[in-house]
Image (tube, helix red, strand yellow):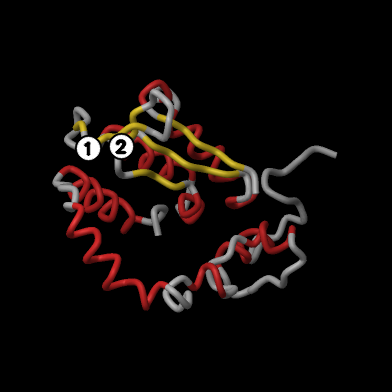
Amino acid sequence: MFDTSSAGIPVRQFGRSDAKISTLGFGGHHLGEAPDEKTAVRVIQQAVDGGITFYDNCWEYRRGKTELWMGAGLKGRRDRVFLMTKTCPHGRDASLALLQQNLQIARNFTPMTASEMDELRNRCKSYAADGRYELYKVSLKFDNPESRLAHGFPLDTKQIEVQDMLGFPENTGQPFPEKEF
């Protein structure tokens, strides 16, 4: 059922397509927390070289900044990855350690048996019903500000991404990326 990529990370078929992707993916949202593009590019390159083949990003993440940074990181490596985008903490130094930890977990992955999965589902059933552990679905804390704006919901101005979006403390008066008028 699971193949192993050359870097030791298991891969599997992506839906009904012919593509095979790593069981460990890389999401672009937190890439925007990198202190600069150079750091973000280094994180992406290490992830690709470490065997991660599935990448997900979206313009709504930091108003396009993470798409640009991920694109720079994938330059020269694009043919080695499956990139998904949509409309609708990896960035800091600690993220490199987290990336290495996640790569190690993926390389040593062993799928659960059917009975182990059933046992896990039964244990989690009562906790999963009310959303108490999915604050991103039921609170302001983790919701993407672009999505909140699109639905007319208020923003949490203490959230790092909202502060970045609003330009605190370096408000240039322009959205990212800056545009010529």
- Check disc 1 and give the amino acid type: Pro
Residue at the image point whose x is 34% and y is 33% from the top: 21
Image quadrant where residue 79 sits = top left
Left or right of 6 on screen, residue 161: right
Give the side of residue 164 with respect to residue 129, left or right. Answer: right
In the rendered image, residue 12, in percent from the top left (x then y), is placed at 29, 34
Q: Is residue 96 above or below residue 179?
A: below
Q: Quadrant of the C terminus?
A: top right
Identify the secondary structure beneath mark 1.
Answer: strand
Q: Amino acid at mark 2?
A: Ser
The quadrant of the rendering that contains the N terminus is top left
Q: Upstream in the sequence, badge 1 or badge 2?
A: 1
Residue annotated with mark 1: 10
| Residue at 25% across, 51% down | 102
Q: Which residue is mark 2?
A: 22
Tell which of 159 and 176 is nearer to you.
Answer: 159
Q: Percent from the top left, x then y, of residue 43?
A: 36, 43
What SS does tag 2 mark? strand
Residue 88: where, in percent of width, then height? 65, 49
Q: Nearer the viewer, residue 172 or 56?
A: 56
Marks 1 and 2 sit apart, C-alpha to C-alpha, by 6 Å
